[in-house]
Image: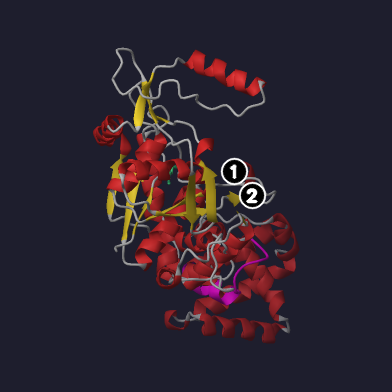
Amino acid sequence: MEVRTRFAPSPTGYLHVGGARTAIFNWLFARRFKGKFILRIEDTDQERSTDESTNAILEGMRWLGMDWDEGPFFQAKRVDIYNEHLERLIKEGKAFYCTCSPDELEAKRQKALSEGKKPKYDGKCRGNTKRPDVPAAVRFLSPNEGFTVVDDIVKGRVVVENSELDDLVIRRSDGWPTYNFCVVIDDATMKMTHVIRGDDHLNNTPRQIQMYEAFGYPVPKFGHVPMILGSDKTRLSKRHGATSVMAYREMGYLPEALFNYLVRLGWSHGDQEIFSRDQLIEVFDLENVGKSAGVFNPEKLLWLNAHYIKESANRKIGSLVTPFLEAKGFEPSRGPDLEKVVTTLRERAKTLLEMADFAEFYYREDLIYDENASAKFLKPESASVLEALVARLQDISDAEFNHDGIEKAFRDITEEKGLKLKDLAQPVRVALTGSAISPGIFEVIEVLGKGRSLKRLQKAVDLISSKS
Ligand code: GLU
């Protein structure tokens, strides 16, 4: 049988990393078994659902590289299908109209609570299968006896006594079918074979199984994945840092890194940490989803991001870092070759944002000098060595203006003047980058190019003479 999985977000906010992980598990499972992955937008809560949120979710899915084979389907457009199903249940006596007023239900609830009993709908309207003249809710007739069993792929067997379960409202008196009902009709009519979702839905599953059974629909396999927790072991929320997938993009993370990180958070394959997407498609399964909640670890995500930055081609990183530089007001096409810039920074930058920060000195017209670095290295006695370098670099032909040619120029000057390399390199570094810390100085000069390097060196010489 063809595997069919789905991701069914409610469009009431951005794509949360927890939701993204659920989507990833479903997507990988479908891809692994060459099945289908379906996207369904659960927008029956009309007050809280927005198009903006739907778009944000789709954008997050695309950014993470998850494609869907069918959909997106929108529940709000499927109300006729839900109503047809609902009529069928009423006709078969498996659902009924309920005219109990909210006040009446609340009074009964309070009474049960005051008697120390668990509040439960008392079945007053059971048997009402004729549509009343007044607006009425519709309830599912839940069996009083027996058990409902969930054989969960992740959690194992969960058994619930049917007497514990209420006659659930499946259509409110305002005419809108409710969440648990729509999910069942959708998953059944969309022929889902596996329902993989957060374990906050595990409570709903016995009720949902009762409804599949009432319709005679095959029950899919369920896998309830534990929630993601923050470092203090409470459910991951904004208090712990960014929870939106797109916020990670804005912070300069690569989708490969977040994807890899989220898969490993709650699933394992031995000790392996780094997986290509193709590898994941080969080995992902539900058996190795952990039973207990994973703790979100931002340092590990950062480590993975640094790994993927190092692994990716310069050209790719160059194009990804461009918008970050542009946001800082720089136009990379007007400065040194971005791919070469990336080569000098990729070992140090853990995010694209950090890389853009590091790259700033390459593109800045007016260099900003770090005060301490300038005081320490741009001193009167540095002027003559900088001038010597200017003269020496000017003599290098364009063909030899490369790492080796530049290194030789440094060596000639240090030998001639009896200096150590750092006596020359540090003033030059500050002159060219504004800081005492930078990538290798020969690379920096090569990437800046002759014209820019000479200009900056000369400017530092001028600065020194203006100071003295
Ligand atoms: N719409 C539900 C949610 O966003 C998901 C329901 C499901 O996966 O069954 O939590």
Residue in the foreground of this view, choosing between 307 and 110 = 110
Residue depicted at 62% across the width and 76% down the height: 388
The CA span between labels 1 and 2 is: 7 Å
Name the residue beneath numbered marker 1: 237
Q: Which mark is residue 321?
A: none
Q: Given contact means CB atoms under 8 Å apart, are the residues at marks 1 and 2 in contact?
A: yes
Q: Horizontal placement of 176 versus 364: left or right?
A: left
Residue at 44% x, 57% y: name it. 24
> Which quadrant of the figure shows ligand 1?
top left
User: Residue 357 in the image: x percent, y percent?
Assistant: 56, 57
Q: Amino acid at mark 2?
A: Gly
For the view shown, which residue lies furthest in the front direction? Answer: 145
* Structural crowding at the residue carrying mark 1, measured as other residues with C-alpha within 10 Å and reported as few (<14), some (14–19) or many (≥20): some
- Name which residue lies at 47% across and 35% down: 144
Span shown in magenta: 435-451
> Does 307 lie within the magenta span?
no
Amino acid tagged 1: Ser
- 118 and 418: which is toward the camera: 118
Tell me the element at label 1: loop
Answer whether residue 103 is visible to the viewer in this image.
yes
Residue 61 horizontal/vertical position (percent)? 39, 52
Q: How is the image coloured?
A: secondary structure
Residue shown at 45% from the left, 68% from the top: 284
Determine if residue 324 is in view.
Answer: no
81 left or right, relative to 372: left
Is 423 rendered above or below residue 143?
A: below
Q: Earlier in the sequence, mark 1 or mark 2?
A: 2
Q: Secondary structure at mark 2?
A: loop
